[in-house]
Amino acid sequence: MLQIELIASPEWGNEQDWPDLAARAARAGIAASSHAGFLSRNFDMELSVKLSDNTEVQALNKAYRGKDKPTNVLSFPQIQPDLFEALANTDDGEALLGDIILAYETCRDEAAAKEISFSDHITHLIVHGSLHLLGYDHENEIDAGLMENCEIKALATLGIANPYAEQT
């Protein structure tokens, strides 16, 4: 069972059901990954999502990635990828996959620039962050392609268009 803990800063408002969106996005990301079997295992998985702002995300980005600027999403995995096989073989217990944090202003501006809905963009970023928690990355072309394919597949199950398709 997948449990999502969500905290949202006031600027995120309450027009959107953020806990439901985060749960659907994380579940879709996991289901589209090579670790889809985790969703049917008899243990609890948890991840946290924090909807924050540029100031907090910039501080974290500087502290953990050495980049003194805000970014849209950061992920902090709690399980090393080489331990996933042991996790897949357990029948009980719980596992904290990690934390995802998003910056409101950056996400808002990106959605506007791409002319997509804010909620669709946030869904994409939570899918993206969930995949990072599962060991996916985009540091090289092959890994980026694998991760993007998982994102496209996950978003399609949620009725969201391919974010990597060429804009016409």
Image: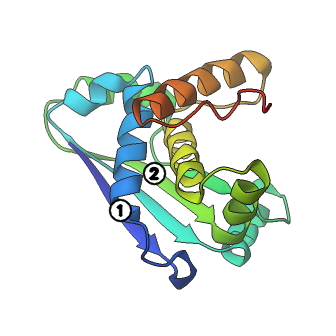
Instruction: State the residue at coordinates (20%, 28%).
Output: 40
Q: Is residue 35 left or right of residue 70?
A: left
The total of numbered circles placed on residues is 2
Q: CA distance from mark 2 to mark 1?
A: 16 Å
Amino acid type assigned to the residue bearing label 2 in the image: Gly
Classify mark 1: residues with Cα within 10 Å, few (<14), some (14-19) or many (20+). Answer: some
- Colouring of the image: rainbow
Q: Residue furthest top?
A: 142
Residue located beneath label 1 in the image: 19
Place of residue 154 in the rendered image (x, y in percent of width and height, measured from the top left): 46, 30
Q: Helix or strand or loop: what does disc 1 sit on?
A: helix
Residue located beneath label 2 in the image: 98
Instruction: State the residue at coordinates (17%, 43%).
Output: 93
Residue 151 appears in the rendering:
yes
Mark 2 vs mark 1, foreground winner is 1
Q: Is residue 67 left or right of residue 28?
A: right
Q: Is residue 167 above or below residue 51?
A: above
Amino acid type assigned to the residue bearing label 1 in the image: Pro
The residue nearer to you, when weighing 83 against 135, is: 135
Residue 64 appears in the rendering:
no
The residue nearer to you, when weighing 3 against 80, is: 3
Instruction: State the residue at coordinates (36%, 22%).
Output: 85
Q: Helix or strand or loop: what does disc 2 sit on?
A: strand
Place of residue 116 in the rendered image (x, y in percent of width and height, measured from the top left): 65, 50
> On the image, which quarter does residue 168 sit in?
top right
Residue 62 badge: none
Q: Is residue 162 left or right of residue 4?
A: right
> On the image, which quarter does residue 6 sit in?
bottom left
Place of residue 19 in the rendered image (x, y in percent of width and height, measured from the top left): 35, 62
The residue nearer to you, when weighing 2 against 17, is: 17
Q: Is residue 97 above or below residue 11?
A: above
Q: Earlier in the sequence, mark 2 or mark 1?
A: 1
